[in-house]
Amino acid sequence: MAPLTTTEHTEAPNEDFRALFAMHPSPMWVYDPLSLRFLIVNEAAAALYGYRADEYPGMTVLDIRPEHERMRMVDAVNSRTDVEKAERWIHRKASGETFEVLTYGREVRFEGRSAILAVVQDRTEVNAIRRQISDTRSLLDSIVDNLPVGVFVKDMEADGLYILFNEACGDIVGMKAQDIAGRTDRALFAGGQTDAFREQDRLAFEADAAISFEETMLRPDGAQRILRTVKRALPAPEGHAPRYLLGISQDVTEERAVEAKLAHLAMHDSLTGLSNRAAFSRHISERTAEATAESPIALLYIDVDHFKHINDSKGHAAGDALLCQVSQRLMQLAEEGDLVARLGGDEFAVVLQLDEPERAGRFAERLLQALGRAFDLDGTREHVTCSIGIALAPDHAVDADVLMRHADLALYAAKESGRSTYRFYEAEMRLVAERRHVMTAELRAALDKRQFELHYQPIVQLDDDGIAGFEALIRWRHPKRGLVAPMEFIPLAEETGLIVPIGDWVIREACRAAAAWPAHLRIAVNLSVSQFRHASLLSTVVAALDETGLNANRLEIEITESVFLTDVDQSLPLLRTLKALGIRIAIDDFGTGYSSLSYLRSFPFDKIKLDRSFVSGIETDAGNLAIVRAVVGIGSGFNATTLAEGIETEEQLQKLRAEGFSEVQGYLLGRPMPQEEAEALIYGGVPKVASSHK
């Protein structure tokens, strides 16, 4: 701070001095170095300290200082240490408030005597600014130190010396932050890592914006971590080249691990660990595009045969265990470069690289053998088979979607061939599929166009050879193909779900026809498993009886043993409800389906229908005859009517009569016939069996 006067021990003109002194914006005063009394105080000083003008003549310079500063002031005056240099002091205002000042003393002549001029600078604002700067710096340091990401700054003119390295950055690289500041990469990291960092620094200095890097580094503790670092050269003052490099690092090891896990889950089946449908679709598209005559591939579609039976009878846990074991056996057969995927449910796919043309067939045969070994399902041994469809690229298709459709057609053909086999795609399969598609469309329209009709096959009771009733059998009168037998369209109806509306029509039409017949005649209607599972079955039956007025005990519903492979908790209550209405329940095709006869104890059937396969050959086959006798015994034990179907010879009829069967049915007794012929038989004719024994 400049002094008020420039000539030591000279006395300025009194008027000029006073004018300059009074107008000066800096607080100042003149005091006597002997008495320490104020001689003159300017307005800026009076305003700063808050004393009245009439108080200063009675005050000394010690009065504006706190007690602990007064002796220091006396010593300074005596030794003149506060003269000709700036000195920091603590002063006190009239209010008692203390504050820091910077004073500059100068010896002058005032009114003919030696005096000291003191000029004062209030340091309050300066100190506040400094404290603010210090607090800001501390805050910034605290923020940087506590950021969850690593922050560092390098001085590139000092060989990349780290001048800032926060704690998070130290944790990331596995070192203490204080051990890194003041050192370079070469002193801290291995050579290869240092070279990588230096190359990143160079790229960051050459770029106009921040650059991001991601790499795997080995920490001193041996841990491998994945770092993502953003680096940028800090802008330099105009005219200067950048010197400092700012880096922000983040340890993304766990994040990448989670991403990898999610990516794995997105492309893998959660139950078996195999590739899922999404991964398979991507893979088959790539492999089909790459397939050539020299490097072909094979696509195998695989379905576990009758998997639903396992799921329904053993429970979903057993079903899941089976799928996992099937997956393991598939993986054991696969080789490097092959893909094994689970597409959903019991559907699997395998993509094979064909080093030789025969490999696809060999793989299918080995798979059938592998699945032929028993599976251990929680202590229970179960056997399953599979159906396999195979399509080759580029032989069968050069497009992935087409290849998949062809493999699916081959799988369908394998199932149609009796399952537990494999089929290669053939062009004829596509034609069959097209015909099936056309038939499905025609089948959907058949109901609306009233193309269905019922034929009725007589059921004869052997105690008096009279007609006990008829079995209603559906026929499709196709406008071009003529009368279509059930075996040609019922499987398709079941596959497409059309069996439910078709079956509803059969129930209503059969009840309508039977309602006009004599009261002792019953009508038998077959129900498929698909119908039995449908929630509307009960309401359909009740509505048919109500609409036609048919007595419930004249309606006989025939179900197959496969119904008991569905949800028994649903099946039995429905059967009991139907029986409670008075409807008779018959078990059809007895002996051909479900291996356990425990369902006979679960529900009191009214009739047991022996399948025609056991009737054929009873004249000469002792085994079939033994089964016939066993069924008679079962019927007697459960108080159920026994019926044998498929009677084609007189000898068969006589054997069954001799064994005690209650009812018979077959071509010998009457073929399925239109309603008009059935009613002619009811009202005028007699069945063949009756005419031959009267």
Image (cartoon, rainbow, N blue to C red):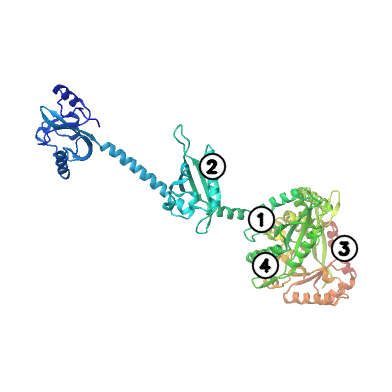
Q: Which residue is mark 2?
A: 202
- State whether residue 494 is above or below residue 640: above
Secondary structure of the residue carrying numbered label 4: helix
Q: Give the alpha-carbon distance from disc 4 to disc 3, as whole Å.
A: 48 Å
- Towards the viewer: 295 or 87: 87
Cβ atoms at labels 2 and 3 below 8 Å apart: no
Task: Count residues near mark 4 (Cα–Cα under 10 Å), then give few for <14, some for 14-19, many for 20+.
Answer: some
Label drawn at residue 313? 4
Sequence-wise, the earlier of marks 1 and 3 is 1
- Rendered location of residue 650, percent (x, y): 89, 71
Q: Give the alpha-carbon distance from disc 2 to disc 1, as whole Å.
A: 44 Å
Secondary structure of the residue carrying numbered label 1: loop
Sequence-wise, the earlier of marks 4 and 1 is 1
Q: Which amino acid type is marked by label 4?
A: Ser
Q: Give the alpha-carbon distance from disc 2 to disc 3, as whole Å.
A: 108 Å
Secondary structure of the residue carrying numbered label 3: loop
Sequence-wise, the earlier of marks 2 and 4 is 2
Q: Which residue is mark 3?
A: 685
